[in-house]
Image (spheres, rainbow, N blue to C red):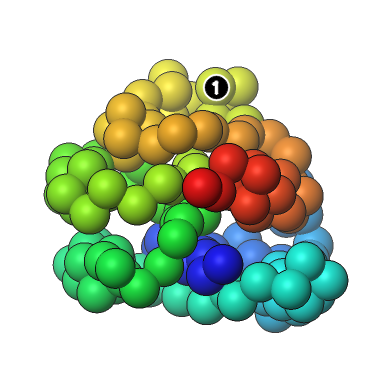
Amino acid sequence: MRILVINGPNINMLGIREPEIYGKETYNDLIELIKGKAKSMEIEVEIYQSNHEGDLVDKIQCSYNKVDGIVINPAAYTHTSVALLDVVKAVGIPTVEVHISNPDTREEFRKISYIGKACIQTIKGRGFKGYIDAIEYLVKHHN
């Protein structure tokens, strides 16, 4: 099984950006956690991060017929990007939306998720563990 893990804007700033919300662990810590889980489950994982909406759309398009599932933390694009919603719908790859914090407990605008409408599951507020939960969910529901 092949899974693509996508992270949107500012996720590369983990450990620096608002540690009271996102914790002190770094983006490299997250990458190592995901790689370790993939190795233990004997699955392939590719991890990608961009601060640019079009790059994220391109990456999802390029994954068509190449991956079995996507884990995505769209970050701020969660609340603004119809383009990400449309591309997830277009490729038809089972996708799980992940958020390190729980957007429902934060500012009002963060309670809206466009991409969530195309995802098979959303995991919120579980920190880095949410990524592991998302991978496990995709593996469990893989045909």
Report whether 135 appears left or right of 59: right
Q: Is residue 87 visible?
A: yes
Q: Position of residue 107 (x, y in %)?
A: 48, 25
- Quadrant in the rendering for residue 103: top right
Q: Residue at x 54, y 22 (%)?
A: 104
Q: At label 1, which amino acid type do we have?
A: Asp
Looking at the image, is 60 positioned above or below residue 49? above
Looking at the image, which residue is at 61% across and 61% down? 17
Residue 140 figure quarter = top right
Give coordinates of residue 124: x percent, y percent: 62, 34
Q: Crowdedness of circle 1 by 10 Å Cα count: few (<14), some, many (20+)?
A: few
* Residue under the point 60% across and 22% down: 105
Q: Is residue 33 visible?
A: no
Residue 29 vs 111, above or below: the answer is below
- Which of the two residues, 143 or 84, is positioned nearer the viewer here? 143
Look at mark 1 in the image and give the residue it sits on: 104
Say whether residue 114 is left or right of residue 143. Answer: left
Task: Tell which of 139 and 37 is nearer to you.
Answer: 139
In the foreground, 55 or 64: 64
Q: Percent position (x, y) of residue 20?
A: 75, 47
**In x, y percent, where is residue 111?**
43, 23
Number of callouts: 1
Q: Quadrant of residue 8?
A: bottom left
Q: Quadrant of the N terminus?
A: bottom right
Give the secondary structure at mark 1: helix
Q: Nearer the viewer, residue 131 or 19?
A: 131
The reply, left or right, for residue 24 in relation to residue 50 is right
